Amino acid sequence: MRKILILLLLSIYTSFAITITTTVKSVADIVKEITKEKAKVYYIIPPNASIHTYEYKASDLKKVYQSDIFLYIGSGEPNINNIIKLLPKGKQIKVSDIKGIKLIKEFEFKEHTEEQKHHHETFHPALWLDPENAKIIAKAVYKRLIKIDPRNKRIYEKNLKSFEKKVDEIIKYGKDKINKLKNKNFISYHYAWPYFTKRFGLKYLAVIELGHGREPTPKHIIKLINLIKTNHIKSIFAAKQFYNPKYADLVKNATKVNIIFLDPFGINKNYIQMIKFNIDKVYEGLK
């Protein structure tokens, strides 16, 4: 009987898993690189949805409140303060507050600076698109994990070092590839890529959309068309989460540019695959 009880307790202990939830998939993918099979990792905003307009479901809130760790960006996510105020501080990681995270607080375009102030956002939320930030997020997750699961410290440390190496390699890959381009001018539909363009040496020249879902004015479209022609732009980059074909097609028909879709959230990709996909697509569009 004693042996059966010990085996039962052991099976319960070994089946226990740390649960971690994030707002966006890209951050969840970074977390998975450290935890591997040692934790259950969830995200609540689907990667094919807009981070700015997503409406949380009851099942999303259940995931958050049942988690051992909840990671959120701290900007761009709708009503995030209403979620975290009921969550113990010890279970939260506000990604933008992690020491060493590089935040973009000054935007290239006047319209988006005004939009930022209107929504009380102090920085651009897509910070995971700078792979250097991914390493910093991964290390913060590692530090929290070894506090709540010290038994697996060596595994987490090994996973962290492996991920850091992969990130360093993808940054080198991206810089080497982008450096081959003669024209590094970058135009996107939505202002989603300042971290990515800054890390890989692209010049963020313009955007079509004037803010979250704000339609461009005729004056802005004309200015954009002239900019594309003057700078010999071959492609405009878009993401399905932030896209209105009406205005993209208008610009495309007037300039003959290509519309190339990037992936800021890693649909059907892990973190490294997502970054590589975007590097390759940008290179193809600008070469």
Image (spheres, grey):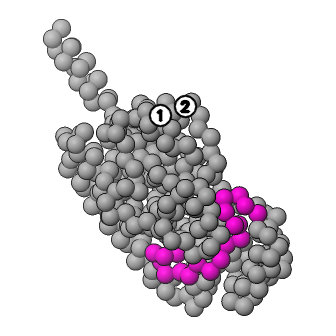
Q: Nearer the viewer, residue 151 or 58?
A: 58
Tell me the residue that label 1 is attached to: 63
Q: Is residue 152 visible in the rendered structure shown here?
A: no
Q: Which of 209 and 106 is in front in this view?
A: 106
- Residue 117 lies, in percent from the top left, at 57, 61
Q: Is residue 40 above or below residue 10?
A: below
Magenta extent: 196-215
Using the numbered discs, state the Cα–Cα distance from disc 1 to disc 2 in whole angstroms. 6 Å
- Residue 226 lies, in percent from the top left, at 77, 86
Q: Is mark 1 on a helix, strand or loop?
A: helix
Residue 21 horizontal side relative to residue 155, left or right: right
Total labels: the figure holds 2
| Furthest residue toward left | 2
Residue 36 horizontal side relative to residue 183, left or right: left
Q: Which residue is drawn at 55% across and 87% down?
A: 181
Kindly identify the amino acid type of the residue bearing the numbered disc 2. Ser
Q: Is residue 18 above or below residue 160?
A: above
User: In the rendered view of the protein, which quadrant contains the C terminus?
Assistant: bottom right
Q: Residue at x 40, y 42 (%)?
A: 70
Q: Nearer the viewer, residue 109 or 126?
A: 109
- Residue 276 lies, in percent from the top left, at 50, 68
Q: Which residue is drawn at 51% across and 50% down?
A: 24
Q: Quadrant of residue 240?
A: bottom right
Q: Disc number at residue 59?
A: 2
